[in-house]
Image (cartoon, rainbow, N blue to C red):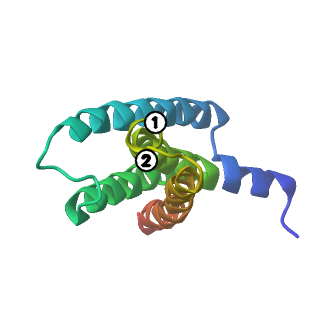
Amino acid sequence: MPSRDAVDTLLFGEQPALSAQFVRVAGALFFLALFAHLPVRYLDGVATSDGLVIGAVAVAMLVAAAVGAYVNSGVLVSIALAAGIGVGFYAPAIVFELRAPGEATLWILAVGSFSSLAVGVAGFAVGRGARRLE
């Protein structure tokens, strides 16, 4: 079994102070995605379920997670960075676009959370792999 220090380093990164800063960045990314997405609901020609919009969000999540893993190598930090964008993107749908919340709210939260988890782990693999290639 790996030592506790090795597990902590894998989960939280090599530098705890930098990990804490990345969690703050994840919070800022949440609000950035939230407020960038809010005006879209007032535009008639833009659909947030458009493949191009979803693809751009996924790429932004992957890049944020990969950069976090490249710099600090923490899988939970990478997931937090991806979740900041993913959950921030889906939150306005919960708040403003649902007439009868309930099952739909859980579905949107699940999509935001599980996509953040998957893309965060993939971004961690990309960032950590790029760092090892150096």
Q: In which quarter of the image is the N terminus?
A: bottom right
Residue, x 85% and y 54% (percent of image)? 4
What residue does disc 2 label?
90
Q: What secondary structure is found at the residue carrying circle 1?
A: helix
Q: How many marks?
A: 2
Residue, x 56% and y 61% (percent of image)? 114
What residue does disc 1 label?
95
Q: Which amino acid does label 2 sit on?
A: Tyr
Can residue 40 be seen?
yes
Residue 96 placed where, x, y %? 40, 36
Q: Which residue lies furthest to the front in this view?
A: 100
Other-residue count near label 2 (Cα within 10 Å), few / some / many at <14 / 14–19 / ≥20: many
Q: What secondary structure is found at the residue carrying circle 2?
A: helix
Can residue 71 be seen?
no
Looking at the image, residue 7 sits to the left or right of residue 125; the answer is right
Residue, x 63% and y 47% (percent of image)? 13
Which is in the foreground here, disc 2 or disc 1?
1
Q: Mark 2 and mark 1: span between their CA atoms?
A: 9 Å
In front: 77, or 132?
77
Q: Which amino acid does label 1 sit on?
A: Val
Can you say whether 114 is above or below 18 in the image?
below
In front: 128, or 39?
39
Identify the mark nearer the N-term, 2 or 1: 2
Residue 62 placed where, x, y %? 39, 58
Looking at the image, residue 118 sits to the left or right of residue 14; the answer is left
Can you say whether 14 is above or below 111 in the image?
above
Looking at the image, residue 112 sits to the left or right of residue 20; the answer is left
Residue, x 68% and y 56% (percent of image)? 10
Residue 70 placed where, x, y %? 46, 53
